[in-house]
Amino acid sequence: MTLPVPRSLVLAAWLSWGGTVDQIIAAVQQDDEPHVVLFHGRVFLLVDFLRKLARGGEVIRPMHQIAVCVFPTPDDPVLDPPVDAAIKACEALVLNAEEGSLALVPSTGNLDDDPETIRVIWQVFSTSDRREAVTDGLHGAARNLPPEGALTSLHTTFAKHAVPRDSSPEGLAELDMTVELIETTLKAELPTWRLPPGLDGWRIERLTSVIRVYVAFNLFDTVATIPVTHLADQRSATTRDLYRMTRWMMTGTTTCLPWMPDPVV
């Protein structure tokens, strides 16, 4: 099993570290229908949008501190002003600029002139420069890191402390199947071919750990809740705190920022 990687993370990684337009399209689109960008009511192919970023060429130079992936939630919207579509998708790519930043939010749908084709649409929203907010978020995540080994023992935590959303026999059976899927997810590998070769080995290792946890939380949240997750040193943190930490670590590990916390995962 390979881990599902958020599209915004893949695109942010390539834009941060650089690559050819063809490399980026292959990594982001995979076998999808061609992705499109919806900007001010106009529709562009993603490949053409990337060529604009490449100033008409075929190579995008590293956009350090400019391209950042973020993972908004209702209580941590990240973008300013908050973007409902980003909160619903729980992801966005931000292109930061002092004169005006853009947030690209991927979703699956169809276009009015092609209602039969389901494709990924990157909708563009205006936002403020989020570099300072991202740095603050990373600092906060670094201050609240769980002890070593806590994240990788989540399968036991989910199995022992789960409160099912549906206590019917069918709901309990679904919970059991989800816990088994989580066990598989926490051993799954990162599809490194989708990421730029410039990412260091330690970033790949860290991303693997954090994305495993991120996917596991999303799976679990559909069928159950955990009132309190007990960590190895007898401290406790709500699942929201752990989920927030994993989201910010995906941001920090993927993109090249001037300050990077050193998480233990």
Image: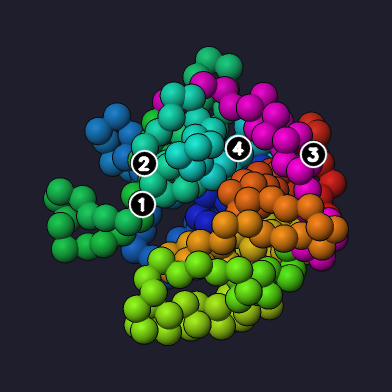
Instruction: Look at discs 1 and 2 and give the one toward the viewer.
Output: 2
Residue 97 lies left or right of residue 250; in this view the side is left
Amino acid found under the numbered disc labelled 2: Ala
The residue segment tinted magenta is: 126-150
- Residue at label 1? 107
The tag earlier along the polypeptide, 1 or 4, is: 4
Amino acid found under the numbered disc labelled 4: Ala
Rate crowding at label 1 as few (under 14), some (14 to 19) or many (20 or more) other CA atoms within 10 Å: some
Circle 2 SS class: helix
Q: Distance of mark 2 from mark 3, alpha carbons?
A: 29 Å
Q: Distance of mark 4 from mark 3, alpha carbons?
A: 24 Å
Query: Where residue 250 appears, x then y in whole percent?
Result: 66, 50
The tag earlier along the polypeptide, 2 or 4, is: 4
The tag earlier along the polypeptide, 4 or 3, is: 4
- Residue at label 2? 85
Using the image as rendered, state which of residue 144 and residue 112 is in the foreground: 144
Q: Distance of mark 1 from mark 2, alpha carbons?
A: 8 Å
Instruction: Look at discs 1 and 3 and give the one toward the viewer.
Output: 3
Instruction: Look at discs 1 and 4 and give the one toward the viewer.
Output: 1
- Residue at label 3? 143
Looking at the image, do the residues carrying marks 1 and 2 touch, with CB atoms under 8 Å apart?
yes
- Residue at image position (50%, 82%) is 176
The tag earlier along the polypeptide, 2 or 3, is: 2
Using the image as rendered, state which of residue 230 and residue 118 is in the foreground: 230
Looking at the image, do the residues carrying marks 2 and 4 touch, with CB atoms under 8 Å apart?
no
Using the image as rendered, state which of residue 84 and residue 251 is in the foreground: 84
The tag earlier along the polypeptide, 1 or 3, is: 1
- Residue at label 4? 67
